Image (cartoon, rainbow, N blue to C red):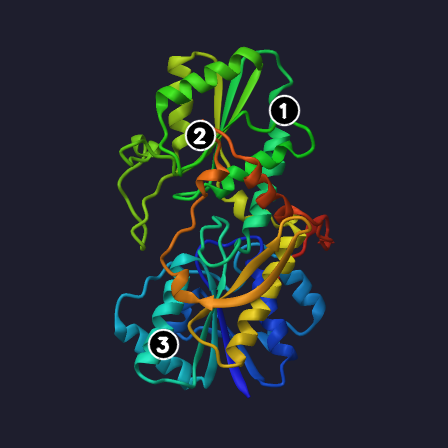
Amino acid sequence: MKNILVAQSGGPTAAINATLAGVITCAYSSKNAGKVYGACNGIQGVLEERFIDLREKLTGTEELSILCQTPAAALGSCRLKLKEESQLKEIVDILHKHEISCFVYIGGNDSMDTVDQLSAYCRKHQITDISVMGAPKTIDNDLMGTDHCPGFGSAARYIAETFSELERDCHVYTTKAVTIVEVMGRNAGWLTAASALARVNGEKGPNLIYLCERAFDNEQFLADVQEQLKDNDSVVVAISEGIKDKDGRYVSEQVQSSAVDNFGHSYIAGSAKVLEELVRERIGCKVRSIELNLMQRCAAHIASDTDIQESRMLGMCACQAALEGESGKMAAVIRLSDEPYQVKFDTIPVCEAANAEKKVPEDFITEDGHDVTEKMMKYLKPLILGDRTVTFENGIAKHIILY
């Protein structure tokens, strides 16, 4: 019997708990699985041995179903970067102490780096009784090796719905106005591109879309807005928070400090506010900026069923691979076709995903740089499909609290 440990890390999503539910489902149904532990607050919780017995917390299918509709990371998260080999040794010693044979880590780029480091340490020291597997997660959709990431589809759906509603609201007046909406995305513009899905039912959606893959030019932006104002009473603009000029300087750096997080990432929110002031000063029309912020990743009430089901399957894939002795790999979605939409689930070497970023391809962006192509639309459309049946209590969706 193999004891299993699962943990979550990085920025939460509306689907990360579905992946957790997949790990648990696989473990509960396997004859080879013994105890199933959850580490509170990711790899930091592993180092601090803050484990909970998931068999005691989640006893049936109904609870697992509620877990799948619970936003954020039910086991908690962290942003701890492993820097010393001594930390890897400490983790291995802790896993041995608790007789844990399988460790599944759910997370994004930096979390997959942790999986890569830990599995490499085990290989180097010929530790064969521990399997380390990664399960992908990130609304940014920037992980290499997988067609798309769990959490992205639900965040994309929230963004598409939000832009659809905003576009309706913005057109109730005849007064010329510009609304600039900032969408999450440091170096990859997938989420911002999803704003184009607001057009699928025949609405205009955003008039202009700027991704961080293209250099942003203030003067061209002003010219684009003025051109749109000629034929529209209201102009809606979608921008990635990480838009940069040709010199690689974030637009938001005009209002942000140089502070960075534990991984050296700059705090970059504020691009929309900068552009709001620019439009107000140079064009002079009514203008507002909106930062969607955390709602993009925690809006579980509007989650894509496709996203939730695939996220759960990836958790099952990662757990099964670990039980079968695979290590140093990440579960992945392999797209087989767009129409009809078909995928399969497999594992890839985690080194292909660790510390690598999948950016929007050039042919997914229009030549003028302020919209997306039909290729992007074909890629996006299947990911937001499917309506979830959400369980409510007292008018509010039910959630699971594990610790």
What residue lies at 53% left-to-right and 70% top-to-bottom? 318
Measuring from the top left, give residue 17's x and y in whole percent: 57, 61
Callout 2 secondary element: loop
Circle 2: residue type: Gly
Q: Which residue is mark 3?
A: 91
Query: Which of the 4 quarters of the picture holds residue 268?
Result: top left
Circle 1: residue type: Asp
What residue lies at 61% left-to-right and 11% top-to-bottom? 174
What residue lies at 47% left-to-right and 18% top-to-bottom? 225
Q: Which residue is mark 1?
A: 169
Determine whether label 3 and label 1 are within 8 Å by CB: no
CA–CA distance between discs 2 and 3? 46 Å
CA–CA distance between discs 2 and 1? 26 Å
Q: Which residue is mark 2?
A: 369
Callout 3 secondary element: helix
Is residue 163 depicted above or below 133 in this figure?
Answer: above
Determine whether label 2 and label 1 are within 8 Å by CB: no
Callout 1 secondary element: helix
Tally of numbered discs:
3
Q: Earlier in the sequence, mark 3 or mark 1?
A: 3
Near mark 2 (Cα within 10 A), the count class, few <14, some 14-19 or many ≥20, is some
Measuring from the top left, give residue 248's x and y in whole percent: 29, 36
Circle 3: residue type: Ile
- Visible in this render: residue 29? yes
The answer to whether 342 appears left or right of 210 in the picture is right
Q: Earlier in the sequence, mark 2 or mark 1?
A: 1
- Residue 267 numbered tag: none
Determine whether label 2 and label 3 are within 8 Å by CB: no
Is residue 11 depicted above or below 129 in this figure?
Answer: above
Residue at the far bottom in the pictured view:
1
